[in-house]
Image (cartoon, rainbow, N blue to C red):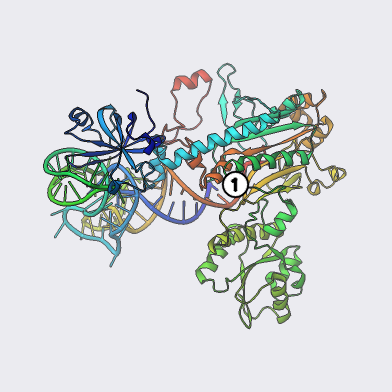
Amino acid sequence: MKRSGAGTLGVDDIGRQVKLQGWVHRRRDHGGVTFLNVRDRSGIVQVVVRPEDAPAASDALAPARNEWVIEVEGVVAARAAEAINPKMATGEIEVVASRGSVLSPSAPLPFNVDGEVDASEETRLRYRYLDLRRKDLYRNLVLRHEVTFDVLEYFHQRDFIHVETPILTRSTPEGARDYLVPSRVHKGSFYALPQSPQLFKQICMVAGLERYVQIARCFRDEDLRADRQPEFTQVDVEMSFVDEEDVFELIEGLFVSVFAGRGIEIEQPFPRLTYAEAMARYGSDKPDLRFGLEIQELGGGLAASEFRAFSGALADGGVVRGFRLPGAAGASRKQVDGWGKLARRHGAAGVLTLRRRESETVFQVKNVLGDDELTFLVDALELTPGDLALIAAGPERTVATALGALRVAAAGELELIPKDRWDFLWVTEFPLVEWHEDDERYYAVNHPFTAPDPRDVDRLADDPASVRSRGYDVVLNGLELGGGSIRIHDRAMQQSCFELLGISAAEAEERFGFLLEALQFGAPPHGGIALGLDRIVMLLAGADSLRDVIAFPKTTSATDLMTEAPSRVESGQLEELGVVLAVEPED
RNA sequence: GGGGUCGUAGUUCAGCUGGUUAGAAUGCCGGCCUGUCACGCCGGAGGUCGCGGGUUCGAAUCCCGUCGGCCCCGCCA
């Protein structure tokens, strides 16, 4: 007899003889009759075991406990009206067992896999295969599979070619730390796991593939967060003979199509913000546009203020900015303290409150602002009675970042973030490079292969910090979903950009020689993007951690609690690789 | 590298101003139960209080260190 899915059975099957194979989800033994909820990936159905009618089945199934794997044959029967369970998809029927057997017993589980999560993350990760039996996680894996499938289908329909690039590749330190793999054949040499297939996909363009896509596993040896895992999956895309608009249109279409598949309508085209606008108005290069709370420039009316925190910051070339929190004038001391703490964590000196009451405006520091200044602030911040404003002063970058963090935190606390909104946007015109004080050199904001904006290219030598790049990010609800750029396809331009980054010709030759070489053999203009598949699925699943959409995720310290990777290895293995440990292994 | 927080039966937690034998729920084991669906009732077993050190007559409780989970800053071209 063919196996039936437990969750597929219904009133149409009444009278049918069926065979179930699955897990005992729950067992209720009433002495004279036993109910077994049998679960497989399709769902759950109730099996009734009656010792009087089917003594053999009853004996065989008697030892079965939660999560034992059993096989049951029986007839689908309608439940009596009063026995119908409306909470169960299959609640109108049950399977009356005529035969049964245990296929595989189970030790008692460390935690329940039915109902709500009641175990710690640590326990769940150690027994990941049990946690994955949970309906929610299973659904997330299915969602991920379907999204992956839809993505590939979308690109396939548009003549993209899926190409697998190497996992064992070359270390190109200039960005995240690499995971290294020692070579046995070439002792003392190392492969690196790719941080992204960036150079390979560009070289695919030189190879004339024109349209490349890859569901690409990437690796970065950096500290983790809820939205950052050491290995993650990118939807990696590259195209020849395109400009920004082609990439935007393609990717917007992708999101429209993938989200439509989940019943979510996305508007096209996505709004765009330049990096400068995003930082000024939202204090972030990945602003969450589901809510307002736009940051206002307040320097104009405060330059002559007697309040030194304001006038001093402005005199030092800094800024004073703030934003309005509607109806928050009653914010508690504790809440305000929390905001101050958050601001300081982001490097600001703190944050000051301005409360608009019915008849007066109260600044946190008493008697330092004149009436005209208060009036100016009320106007600039568009405060109405009952509102509160958060104001910060200091160096532009710090103020922007701190207010950006406050904007998000306050919106969350005050429940100003609407649910079920999907606010995509493009952030464009990133700076090409950024000066790093600690090692006194420029670093690429995106990566060293990003093309400079032709409008700014004449300043490349004299004022590189002011040069914009042809890079862009796609952002959804405050989360960076991906980034890309139009690349440099001209060897000379690539060389001068390396130079700008303090990479000498010899060094560039050593590290990126293969790219420079390729660029001299008819490299087409090209550009692309890489999207974080894990993050996309996380948002679609409504999860708040990447761990919930990755089958076997790692902990915050980059370990796998199930396999206990990373692990020590036998000395023989190290010897064979020519590796000697300079430090005692931990633990 | 830094900050916060947590770590006590299999699991989730309570206990923490130091003081008899460390509790609850759930799970597990045994018994009873013919319509439950988080079944119910009765009984039982189950502990390196993360680990190490210190203070003390006495430490789950206080102190120091360390390990691990989670969140955040730095970092993530």
Tell me which chain the residue with mark 1 is part of.
Answer: A
Q: Is residue A449 above or below residue A272?
A: above
Q: Is residue A71 above or below residue A26?
A: above
User: Label 1 amino acid?
Assistant: Ile
Q: Residue at x 68, y 36 (%)?
A: A174
Q: Residue at x 77, y 69 (%)?
A: A300
Q: Nearer the viewer, residue A428 or A305?
A: A428
User: Residue extending furthest top?
Assistant: A185
Quadrant location, the C terminus of chain A: top left
* Residue A218, visible in the rendered structure: no
Q: Report whether A309 appears left or right of A491.
A: left
Q: Nearer the viewer, residue A170 or A416?
A: A416
Q: Which residue is mark 1?
A: A264
Instruction: Name the spot of residue A82 as percent of width and height, x first.
Output: 28, 49
Instruction: Name the spot of residue A128 as percent of width and height, x first.
Output: 41, 36
* Residue A426, visible in the rendered structure: yes
Q: Nearer the viewer, residue A215 or B64?
A: A215
Q: Secondary structure at mark 1?
A: loop
